[in-house]
Amino acid sequence: MATPWYFVALLLTILTSSQGILTTLSQSDGGYKYDYATVPFLAEVFKLIISGIFLWREMRTSTSTPARITKDWKSVRLFVIPSLIYLIHNNVQFATLTYVDTSTYQIMGNLKIVTTGILFRLFLKRKLSNLQWMAIGLLAVGTTTSQVKGCGEASCDSLFTAPIQGYLLGFLSAGLSALAGIYTEFLMKRNNDSLYWQNLQLYTFGSLFNVARLIADDFRLGFEKGFWWQRIFDGYSITTWLVVLNLGSTGLLVSWLMKYADNIVKVYSTSMAMLLTMVASIYLFSFKPTVQLFLGIIICIMSLHMYFAPPQTLVDLPVTNEAHSKTLKQVTVEEKTDS
C-alpha cells in the first residue's frame, strides 16, 4: 500500500485521544441528553456507507486489476463472529462496572495489552522476540502506572477491594477485547479480498447487532419513549455528531491496520492515545497531573522504542568468533600479497 502504516497509526492515535474528550464535551449537566446507544449504531452506518462508496469507486476505476470479492456465504458468515464477540464484550463491560470502581476497571483494562500479545502468538502464529515481549510488558506497566492515583486520595481506599466477580469479569473483558481484535485480523488477512468489501460485511453485521440492541432497550423500557427510530436524533448537537464521525473514522482506520499492519500496532496506538487524552485533559478539564502520569508516559515511550526499533540499535551485539576468523584471513592474505 502507498500509505505507510505508521501514518495511519498516528492518525488513529490522534482520533482515539479526542474520542473521550468529545464524549465528555457532548454531556450536558453531567449527563447525556441523547440516547448514547444510538451513537455506535450511527457510527456503524457511517462506516458502512463510506466502505460502500470506496468499494464502488474501486470496482469502477480498477479495470486492469478489479477488486477481489468472495461472495461465498461460508466466507461471509464468518464476519458475524467478531460482531457477536463485541456485543458480548460490551455487556461484560457494563456488568464489570457494577462490581468495581472506574479506577480499578481502567487498570484491569490494560490486561488486554498482554492478552493481545498472547493470542497474537497462539492463534496467528506470529513470533515475537524477547525484546518485543518485554516491550509489551512495559507498555502494560506504563499505562497502569499512569492510571494509579496517589494513596492520599479518597478513591485509593476502594482500589482492588471489589468482589471476586468483578475481577473475573475484568479478565473476561480483556480476553474478549483481545479475541475480537485477533479474529478480525485473521478475517482481514485470510484472503486477498478488497478491504472495502470486507468492511462492508463486517459493518453490515455490526449495524444489525446494534439495531437488535436498540430494539431490546425498547422492550426493556416498555416502549415508554416510543420506538428507537422515532427518537434517534433527539438531543443531538454538533459535538454529538463529531463523536459519531470520530467513532466511525476510528473504526475505518482500525480495519486498515488489521489488513495491512497488525493488532500490536493498534494496541500501541490506543495506549498512546489514552496517555495523550490524559495530557489534553490537564488543559481542557483542569485535570491535575501526577508523578505517576509522567512516569507512565516515559515507560510507554521506552516500550514503543523497544518494540519497533531494530535490535542492533538497542544492544551492542558482540563480534562473533566467525567474524574474527574472517578478519584474520583477510589480514594474512594481505600480508602474503605485500611480500
Image (cartoon, rainbow, N blue to C red):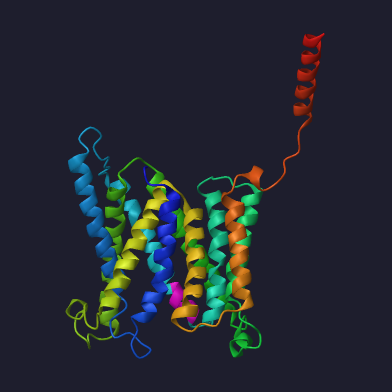
Q: Give how far across and how far down residue 244 sits, in percent.
A: 30, 70
Q: Give how far across and how far down residue 294 sits, in percent.
A: 60, 72
Q: For the point 37% across and 54% down, which residue is it?
A: 255
Q: How many marks?
A: 0
Q: Main secondary structure of the magenta part?
A: helix
Q: Quadrant of residue 159?
A: bottom right
Q: Is residue 24 visible?
A: yes
144 to the left or right of 18: right
Who is closer to the viewer here, 156 or 162? 156
Q: Is residue 260 above or below residue 214?
A: above
Q: Is residue 96 magenta?
A: yes
Who is closer to the viewer here, 21 or 224? 21
Q: For the point 57% across and 75% down, which residue is it?
A: 147
Q: Is residue 213 visible?
A: no
Q: Is residue 141 above or below residue 162?
A: above
Magenta stretch bounds = 92-97
Q: For the point 64% across and 83% down, which residue is it?
A: 150
Q: Give how far across and how far down residue 75 sits, in percent.
A: 32, 46
Q: Is residue 37 magenta?
A: no
Q: Quadrant of residue 206?
A: bottom left
Locate the N terminus and report the quarter of the image it occupies: top left
120 to the left or right of 51: right
Who is closer to the viewer here, 51 or 313? 313
